[in-house]
Amino acid sequence: MGEERSFFNEMQDEAGIPRAAYEQLVSWLESKPSNFLNRKSREAETIFRRLGITFAVYGAHEATERLIPFDPIPRIISAAEWRRLSAGIEQRVRALNAFLHDIYHRQEIIRAGRIPADLILQNEAFLPEMVGFTPARKVYAHIIGTDLVRVSENEFYVLEDNTRTPSGVSYMLENRETMMRIFPDLFQMHRVAPVEQYPDLLRQTLESVGPDQGKSDQTICVLTPGIYNSAYFEHAFLADSMGVELVEGRDLFVDQGKVYMRTTREPKQVDVIYRRIDDAFLDPLTFNPDSMLGVPGLFDAYRAGNVTICNAPGTGIADDKAIYAYVPDIIEFYTGQKPILNNVPTWNCSRPDDLAYVLDNLEDIVVKEVHGSGGYGMLIGPTATKRQISDFRKILMANPSNYIAQPTLALSACPTHVASGVAPRHVDLRPYVLIGDQVRITPGGLTRVALKKGSLVVNSSQGGGTKDTWVLED
């Protein structure tokens, strides 16, 4: 692993000595023949192909269905590190749900001057239709993916909060199952916290927020935009794992304020919809009238309390990148505590002083679209050409409020199987949080890895891969 580095290496210290959590993995790897990882990578790829674990790439010239590259070397997190991370994540998701309830009700945080009114009220992710409505158990974001990056031994930052329809959990589950099949001996050497109960916990969470809490048999469905969506594999996987129906908008209808699912026999009333389509397409009578994906009358049935939608419409305001800069204030305002996990320092380009600083330092920082995702529409200054920076400067100046900027972090690196052997590659982590009758955090999450040497972009749509994440138990 002799690459130059000014980043935190999770497997070994500066002297090349393995860190405690990685000691057994290092000695195990050293005991294997040189072609071992090549062979195991091919084995894993065969498993993924057989299962059909693909994602769609929009706008790609080649085939749109791709296999996500899988790295067979696990990322390992110690029990003590995980305790701190999970405490910080729980604090954050509780505060974000309190924030969502507040801005759709009394708006105390605006009155207190802690967040500018227009940042919320003029935001396209804010849904006026949700004002005054309280969902079951006051939970708005039931499924959250919190993106974390590590920069040193004890420093983790939250990169973003995915409170709308976070994806990737199926890869976390399939990565684990594949690892257990190809490396059973390595599992026996470690006490790895399980993740395979996630579908059961997801179902329990969804049942706990049904409109009729006394009903023992809640009818749940997963609402998908259909087979052409990039995460369709995951929609089908989760519905199957939970033992619930996978439906499209045309499979549901509303009658007298209640939602029903068409079946081969008679229609069946639906209690909880885990939706994987965006707000705008949920109900053509309330939102986008051209939507063919949603269910006419769904939003009125929801407001009447006859069905629960997870995540609630309007939760996108909590993961808006302009709001992100205020999350530390949001945590203090609703919990009275300092944040356990810090934000990345952020410049909001809608502020003239911040914009001036960003324009002067484009070659050193990362600029992102406020509503962007998947690594699109962003500038990574240190790796951009002069032409790219010049072009981006014009786009930024034309619409500054559409962008935020952050320093380029030295993301931590993990050992990764590459063509030349084993080398450090930069990673992030998306733990998955479920919120209903309680907060349930799956130990670990999805580690995404930038497979290109020196790259900081981990998104699968931009050439990144994934790893299994092991949280060690005490």
Image: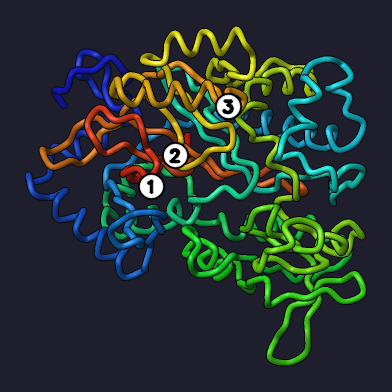
Instruction: Quickly name the residue at label 2.
Output: 376
Q: Earlier in the sequence, mark 3 or mark 1?
A: 3
Q: Is residue 212 visible?
A: no
Q: Amino acid at mark 1?
A: Ser
The structure residue drawn at horizontal position 27% and vertical position 47%, both measured from the top left corner, is 72
**Which residue does the image show at 28% across and 46% down from the upper left?**
71
In the displayed structure, 320 sits above or below 278; it is above
**Callout 2: helix, strand or loop?**
loop
Q: Amino acid at mark 2?
A: Tyr
> Which one is earlier in the sequence, the residue at label 2 or at label 3?
2
Instruction: Report whether 243 appears left or right of 79.
Output: right
Q: Which residue is mark 1?
A: 461
What is the x, y in percent for residue 385? Answer: 28, 23
Task: Kindly identify which residue carries mark 3.
Answer: 399
**Which x, y percent locates residue 326?**
68, 20
Q: Quadrant of residue 30?
A: top left
Residue 219: percent from the left, percent from the top?
75, 71
**Pointers 2 and 1 in contact (C-beta within 8 Å):** yes
Query: Is 273 rendered above or below residue 94?
Result: below
Type of colouring: rainbow
Q: Residues within 10 Å of mark 1 (few under 14, many from 20)?
A: some
Amino acid on which disc 3 is placed: Asn
In the image, residue 314 sits, relative to residue 102, either above or below, namely below
